Image (cartoon, rainbow, N blue to C red):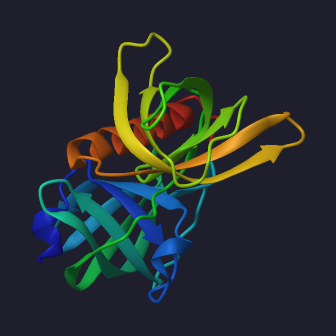
């Protein structure tokens, strides 16, 4: 796949800081702001709420999602850092993008209401998110859930309840947090439609944009 033809303005990126980084090492996110003359221009990358510097000559691996085609990665070289009102970087793709299969996604720490319904029992459990990603969600609940059970979740993305995400999932971990005296339930999405996943990922990036605007990251 030709990288430059696919990386449009606004495309979200996940950056691995080394050319040979493993896909599950990533925690760095950015976004395309321009593509011209064989180069891609990206906003200042963020890692765990803080700016992550790149250096001229550095080779990085980049992952991006095309909801109609899948998830792709490619290697790029950092050409230069541009210091203006908004710090950006110019990068040059090396070779073409390859399609990959992966279940790892950036996790955003955020508290949102969640309703969990067990598939095998008429039970509804209320909880709040600890973090959320395009691959799953971690939830605080007052009672434990058995590992392996299938569930349906309603995730209230906004406080005004205007946008609710419905996803099916499976409990992959559950343990008690002694400090909060609550259970931490790790849920992996099952059979999620790509438009729904894209909506979650877009929500995560929008929250990051707002936090940057407020100077909180």
Image: 100 above or below 182: below
Residue 105, quarter of picture: bottom left
Residue at the far top: name it. Answer: 160
**Viewer-proximal residue among 215 and 115:** 115
Image x and y of residue 14, in percent: 42, 63
Residue at the image point whose x is 85% and y is 34% from the top: 181
Q: Is residue 37 visible?
A: no
Residue name at image x 68 percent, y 35 percent: 140
Closest to the observer, 101 or 48: 101
Give the residue furthest to the front.
121
Place of residue 163 in the rendered image (x, y in percent of width and height, measured from the top left):
35, 20
Quadrant of the frame with the C terminus: top right
Would you say residue 23 is visible in this rendering? yes
Q: Residue at x 44, y 87 (%)?
A: 19
Is the residue 114 above or below the residue 147 in the image? above
| Residue 138, horizontal then vertical, whole percent | 59, 44
Which residue sits at x=53%, y=55%?
Answer: 148
Task: Find residue 91 and report its horizontal and vertical position in percent.
Answer: 34, 73
Quadrant that contains the N terminus = bottom left
* Residue situated furthest right in the rendering: 179
Give the answer, above or below, for where 191 lies relative to 102: above
76 left or right, relative to 56: left
The number of numbered badges drawn on the structure is 0
Residue 39 left/right relative to 137: left
Q: Nearer the viewer, residue 3 or 88?
A: 3
**Left or right: 34, with 146 as reference point:** left
């Amino acid at each position: 796949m030709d990288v430059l033809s696919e990386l449009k303005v606004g495309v979200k990126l996940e950056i691995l800081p080394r050319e040979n980084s493993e896909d599950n090492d990533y925690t760095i996110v950015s976004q395309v702001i321009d593509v011209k003359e064989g180069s891609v221009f990206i906003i200042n990358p963020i890692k765990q709420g803080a700016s992550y510097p790149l250096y001229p000559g550095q080779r990085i691996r980049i992952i991006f999602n095309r909801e109609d085609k899948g998830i792709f990665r490619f290697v790029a070289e950092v050409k230069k850092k541009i210091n203006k009102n908004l710090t950006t970087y110019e990068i040059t793709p090396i070779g073409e993008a390859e399609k990959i299969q992966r279940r790892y996604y950036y996790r955003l720490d955020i508290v949102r209401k969640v309703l969990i319904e067990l598939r095998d029992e008429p039970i509804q459990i209320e909880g709040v998110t600890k973090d959320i990603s395009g691959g799953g969600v971690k939830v605080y609940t007052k009672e434990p859930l058995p590992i392996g059970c299938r569930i349906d979740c309603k995730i209230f993305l906004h406080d005004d309840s205007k946008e609710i995400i419905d996803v099916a999932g499976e409990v992959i971990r559950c343990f008690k947090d002694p400090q909060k005296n609550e259970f931490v339930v790790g849920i992996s999405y099952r059979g999620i439609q790509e438009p729904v996943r894209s909506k979650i990922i877009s929500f995560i990036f929008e929250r990051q944009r707002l936090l940057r605007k407020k100077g909180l990251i």
